[in-house]
Image (spheres, rainbow, N blue to C red):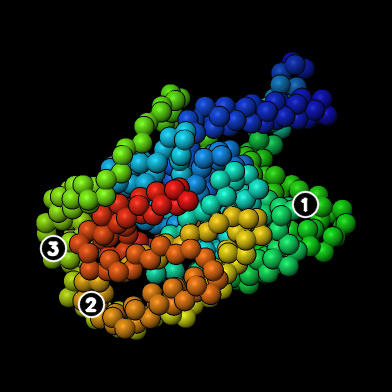
Amino acid sequence: MIKGFCLACALVVASLIGLQIFINRTIDHTPVQVLRTFTEESKFKSAEVLKKSLSENTLVVMGSSELNSDSDKPSYPFSVFNTEDFNLLKVGQGGYQTLIHAGILGAIGPEMGYKKVLLILSPQWFVPQGIEAAAIPANLSISMVQTAMANEDLSEGLKRDFIERLIQGSQGFEGYQRSLQDLSSFYLDDSNDPILVFSTGINTNMDSFRQRWKLAMKLFPLKLDAQYFPSEPVFQKEEWLQSAIGRATESSTNNAFHIDDSYYLTNIQNQLDSLKNTGQDIDYSSSPEYEDLKLFLRMAKEQGIEVTLVSTPLHGQWADYTGFPLEKRQEYYAKIRAFAEAEDVRLADLSRHEYEPHFLKDIMHMGEVGWVYIDEVILNLRGD
Amino acid sequence: MKDKGLLQTTLLFYLLMMAILLYALWNESTGAPAFIYNNF
């Protein structure tokens, strides 16, 4: 019996080593150009993978669902800027908000050779209740928080404010809160409790392994083993805008809102009447998101990272239809402008494009025309 | 006969340990559900 157990232990160790080799090989063999633009939860939750995707010429672009995928669109920035001389690291998908990005920036900051980050703000983040509790444990891994806590560039005060905000924001997720509390005790209260030290180490290492394993399982079937080196197209704003408008017009033929046909069919057509005037009570002028944004800026500032915020517009025509008052929308845009000025942070204000057809492809996500303006923002940023 | 018994015991322990380990490694222990963002 004991002999059998020992042999089984040896086999388990060998199997884990084999799994580790499989994970490393799969991730290492994925072209970094693909890894940088890959949209996958486990990538965004692995500090190791994000760090590995960075180079001296990588601008980190953070956002939410608008980043999900527009790779078939010529003006999509992650396709435009993807050379060795200048490229983008995509961080975010639906559910990612400023607090999550603050944690990720805190974790990867020391590895960022190109000390600039672009944060695309979605107006929908600034709801009165702020980020949903479930979005925090689902999108910010414990290993990511641990990497941020271990970052020596960050002050103890900032780490404490950050982890307290995470604990407060993730109410209802006791397991996650316990892990955060352990990290807080370990890194901020200098606890030497051997059980805490052991459990924190095991917990964060297992989480790091888990995220890389999940990513490897997504990458492996894609067989992305060939390196490719795309060249960067020459940006010509007017020409790109005209082409974008042409393509977008062709794909929005069944509605008066210039929304993509498929989105309109799936999400709006059958409930158009019932959606009228449903936005009368929307208000983005007061939200915990503004404080989370301050945390994000502190994370950047303490690491010497220059932030550019992008203020994206709502869909003007749709907002009018749903009764979201113009004054309330203007109030939100003005608040973002005032915030940027008060915090002395660079702002690319695209809010004036509310009524520009195809700036958004649906009622909230960046469209072909919108991406051209984002390309311009990135080019200006690179030129500095 | 003795070898067969050892093989069975080893296999049993191996499968049991791997099942527990892989389950613990794959599943988040934070109590966090998959968060599906409502795009609409």
**For the residues tagged 3 and 1, is the chain the same?**
yes
Q: Which residue shows up at 63% across the image and 70% down it?
A: A165
Judging by the rendered image, the residue that carries numbered circle 2 is A320
Asked if marks 3 and 1 touch (Cβ < 8 Å), the reply is: no
Q: Are marks 1 and 2 in contact (CB under 8 Å)?
A: no
Residue A75: give x, y in percent of width and height.
30, 46
- What's the mark number on residue A207? none
Q: Residues within 10 Å of mark 2 (few under 14, many from 20)?
A: some
Q: Secondary structure at mark 3?
A: loop
Residue at horizontal 58 percent and vertical 32 percent from the top: A23
**Distance of label 3 from label 1 (alpha carbons):** 56 Å
Left or right? Give the position of A148 relative to A61. right
Ranked by sequence position, the earlier of labels 2 and 3 is 3
Residue type at mark 3 is Asn
Circle 3 residue: A255
Q: Which mark is residue A199?
A: 1
